Amino acid sequence: MTTTTATPSPAATTSQSVRQQQWREFWFYFSASKTAVAGLVFLIGVILVALFADFISPHLPAEQYREFAETPPAWMEGGQMRFFLGTDYAGRDMLSRIIHGARLSLLAGCIVVLLAASIGIFLGLVAGFKGGWVETIIMRVMDTIMAVPGLLMALVLVALLGPGLLNAMVAIAITYMPSFVRLARASTINEMNRDYVTASRVAGAGPLRLMFIRILPNCMAPLIVQGTLSFSTAILDTAALGFLGMGAQAPLPEWGTLIAENRDLMLSAPWTVTFPGIAILLAVLAINLMGDGLRDALDPKLKRS
């Protein structure tokens, strides 16, 4: 009895080699920016810290050591190694709360971008593909949203929905939608005149197939860059709402909430607000650096020969 080994078809082999070539080209241009690579490495580190926060943090984030309240960091006079970054007014370990706060802040940023991108890209595709009165209605609604400062609109929406991390994420996602809608619409209109779209129409492809199978994959490069940059601003806006008491509520260790609940200690125990602020700064900086590298790698106009 003879057995035959299935060999990949020439088309499949060609498609795989094209994908490999595209990946090598992307990494070549992305890795040309050392700051983008550094941002990517740092972001991966933050993600790993967030994923394994339960095993990395030396204490539980809500565990209180009242006798050690407002203990300074380990390198300052009166500090202890068991509380390396000091403690807050309730004797909770700042390092543990910052580590667990990374999980909440990154999760909030991801959910905001996913909500804004999924709805915004869909509306942008429909507006660019359909045109006419459908496009007019969608774009006028987006223009109305963009006419109000994003953080102010988010505050109004959270005031209507009620304080809380989930409501804050929904409010921020609504303010981010217009950017994705406008970008997806412009990319769709640009792709509508391509030969492959005309060929697909002639072949009998329906509207949904044209939009999501043919056009959308070719619009993803700028949308990915927009999503990356929106991720960093989402972390900032979530922290801002948390600081104002409209986002995550204490005792949740979200970075903005950490600053808010210790703001009365800015002079007596400055480490309680300094270290959460540094965490926000470094995370946002790393994401922005990575976003710049993605833009350089995915935009053909910015690629250097």
Image (cartoon, rainbow, N blue to C red):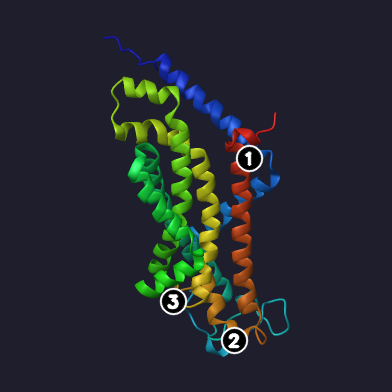
Pointer 1 or 2: first along the chain: 2
Q: CA distance from mark 3 to mark 1?
A: 38 Å
Q: Position of residue 30 (x, y in %)?
A: 63, 39
Q: Can you say whether 60 is above or below 106 in the image?
A: below
| Residue 302 in view, yes or no | yes
100 lies left or right of 118 = right
- 112 on left or right of 291: left
Task: Name the residue tied to disc 1.
Answer: 296
- Are the residues flagged by discs 3 and 1 in contact, CB closer than 8 Å? no
Where residue 21 sits, quadrant-wise, is top right
Marks 2 and 3: CB-CB under 8 Å?
no
The numbered dot on residue 249 is 3
| Crowd rating for badge 1 (residues with CA inside 10 Å; few <14, some 14–19, many 20+) | many
Could you tell me how far apart the alpha carbons at marks 2 and 3 are, in whole angstroms? Answer: 17 Å
Task: Tell me the SS state at disc 1.
Answer: helix
Kindly identify the residue that appears in the image at 39 percent across and 63 percent down. Answer: 170
Can you identify the residue that label 2 sits on? 264
Q: Quadrant of the N terminus?
A: top left
Which is nearer the eye, 67 or 104? 104
Kind of residue at disc 2: Asp
The residue positioned 44% from the left and 72% from the top of the image is 248
Judge by depth and name the residue closer to the eye, 196 or 131. 131
How far apart in space, not on screen, are marks 1 and 2 (Cα)? 43 Å
Q: Which quadrant is the C terminus positioned in?
A: top right
Residue in the picture at 59% in, 81% down: 87
Report the amino acid beneath label 1.
Asp
Left or right: residue 111 compared with residue 203 = right
Can the viewer see residue 59 in this picture? Answer: no
Which comes sooner in the sequence, label 3 or label 1? 3
Q: Amino acid at mark 3?
A: Gln
Of callouts 2 and 3, which one flags the residue occurring earlier in the amino acid sequence?
3
